[in-house]
Amino acid sequence: MRTVALVGFACQSIACLLSVIACVSKDYEVSETYSDTEYKTEYKTEIYTEIVPVVISSRQGRDSLQPSTKWFNSLYSPGFSKISSTYYYGYQLEPVAYSTAQLKITLARGLEKYQGHIAVYDMTGIGQIPPMPTIPVKFGIDVPIEQQRWMAEMNAKLSAARLLGEVFLGDTIAGSITFDARGIQEFSIFVNCYNSHAISSVQLTWADETVENRTVTKERQVPYQIPYQVQKQRTTIETRKVPFWETIFGSE
């Protein structure tokens, strides 16, 4: 009886072992559905207040200017050495207290026929250049010492001055020279040309605005995010136990 029992136990053990050996692990691709949260942008109107400058009154005007200093000399203009004929015009300005101020130097028509150079300099804090002193030429002296000093002073002032604008005469030229007048109390125009009427006019165009800070109500669009659910699919790997012959012969 004991022998029979042992034989039965052995058979069961062998059957279990064969069953374990006969099953192997195999990976399968499996599609599954899942929910995911996404966001979309929408907008809402928001009311807010802001302090802004508002123009409550405005004045505009135009002033014609006349030179306070004026002279002519047979000099070469600074930066242009072909024409030995220079006209100088110096202008004084009151401190500009307007909101905006622009100086416009209008050139005469027909300057395309001439060669030369017109330059405008800021002489604020430097001073105007006076006419060259007229000194009788002494025998053996080409340029009197007074005139040499004057030329040295002119060159020093122009070196310190700021160039506001310039035009080279020729086939085509700009009709005017314009620049911001704020901060300028003196300026000068050098006309290196054989035309004594190259400058048609010099005008100060200004505008004076009265501005107040006022609180105004405005609207703006503010974005915000709204969540929502979407259904998606993904592929995962699932491991299963299958008979080993499926890995060899495949399965339907």
Image (tube, rainbow, N blue to C red):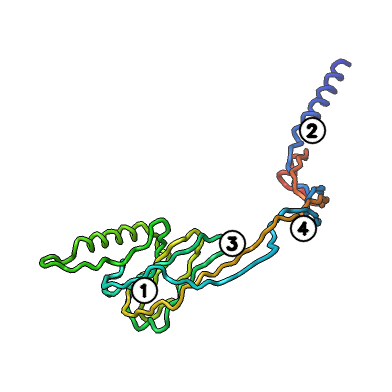
**SS for tag 4?**
strand
- What amino acid is at disc 3? Ser
Mark 3: give few (<14), some (14-19) or many (20+) Cα within 10 Å.
some
Q: Quadrant of residue 82?
A: bottom left
**SS for tag 1?**
strand
Check residue 168 in the rendering and tell me which mark sits there, or answer none.
1
Indicate whether 31 appears above or below 108: above
Position in image of residue 70 (x %, y %)? 36, 70
Mark 1: give few (<14), some (14-19) or many (20+) Cα within 10 Å.
some
Q: Are marks 1 and 3 in contact (CB under 8 Å)?
A: no
Residue, disc 4: 218
Q: Nearer the viewer, residue 134 or 9?
A: 134
Examine the rendering and report whether any part of residue 126 can be seen.
yes
On the rendered structure, is 52 left or right of 200?
A: right
- What amino acid is at disc 2? Ser
Examine the rendering and report whether any part of residue 119 can be seen.
no
Q: CA distance from mark 2 to mark 4?
A: 81 Å
Residue, disc 3: 99
Q: Nearer the viewer, mark 3 or mark 2?
A: 3
Extreme residue toward the right, this view: 1
Q: Earlier in the sequence, mark 1 or mark 3?
A: 3
